[in-house]
Image (cartoon, rainbow, N blue to C red):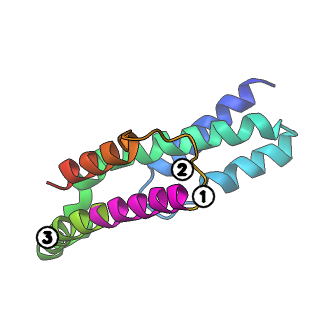
């Protein structure tokens, strides 16, 4: 019966690799879980890992087939929109991380800060996000 856990993983990969409308990997996994009385504590991580791998594999090849389904003009518009949106999203994420860190420090959740100590992780995250945006 342990081979069924491999089936759960492969089903999640296969369902998420298909760019067409298909059932969700979670639906397939729950169906296998119920039908074969599998351990949910094993099915959940296997399904998540398979789904992640399937989505990653799909992202590697989908841009080659996009021309078959999407007109060239729309593809160019999407590329332009992606170039405009990504820096704004990174800047927004940077701002939200700063606000979250700021709220934690000012509400007293962080007490062990020494005088003159730098804000290492938040500052490092902000610098990294700015480099990604550029």
Residue tagged 1: 24
Residue tagged 3: 80
Residue at far front of view: 115
Residue 86 lies, in percent from the top left, at: 24, 63
- Taking 104 as reference, is 65 left or right? left
Residue 116 counted in the magenta span: no
Residue tagged 2: 15
Can you say whether 29 is above or below 69 in the image?
above
In front of the other: 69 or 121: 121
- In space, the residues marked 1 and 3 are separated at their CA atoms by 30 Å
Mark 3 surroundings within 10 Å by alpha-carbon count, few (fewer than 14), some (14 through 19), many (20 or more):
few
Res 68 seen here:
no
Quarter the C terminus occupies = bottom left
In front of the other: 101 or 81: 101
Write the start and end of the magenta stretch as one range: 91-106
Q: Quadrant of residue 24?
A: bottom right
Residue 94 counted in the magenta span: yes
Can you say whether 115 is above or below 22 in the image?
above
Where disc 2 sits, the SS reads helix
Q: Are marks 2 and 1 in contact (CB under 8 Å)?
A: yes
Residue name at image x 88 percent, y 40 percent: 37
Q: Quadrant of residue 36?
A: top right
Where disc 3 sits, the SS reads helix
Where disc 1 sits, the SS reads loop
């Amino acid at each position: 019966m342990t081979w069924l856990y491999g089936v759960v993983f492969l089903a999640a990969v296969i369902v998420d690799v298909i760019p067409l409308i298909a059932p969700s990997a979670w639906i397939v996994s729950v169906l296998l879980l119920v039908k074969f009385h599998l351990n949910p504590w094993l099915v959940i991580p296997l399904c998540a890992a398979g789904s992640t791998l399937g989505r990653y594999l799909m992202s590697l090849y989908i841009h080659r087939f996009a021309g078959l389904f999407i007109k060239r003009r729309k593809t160019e518009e999407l590329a332009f929109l992606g170039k405009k949106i990504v820096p704004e999203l990174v800047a927004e994420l940077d701002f939200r991380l700063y606000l979250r860190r700021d709220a934690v420090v000012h509400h007293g959740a962080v007490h062990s800060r020494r005088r003159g100590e730098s804000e290492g992780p938040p500052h490092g995250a902000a610098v990294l996000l700015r480099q990604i945006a550029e």
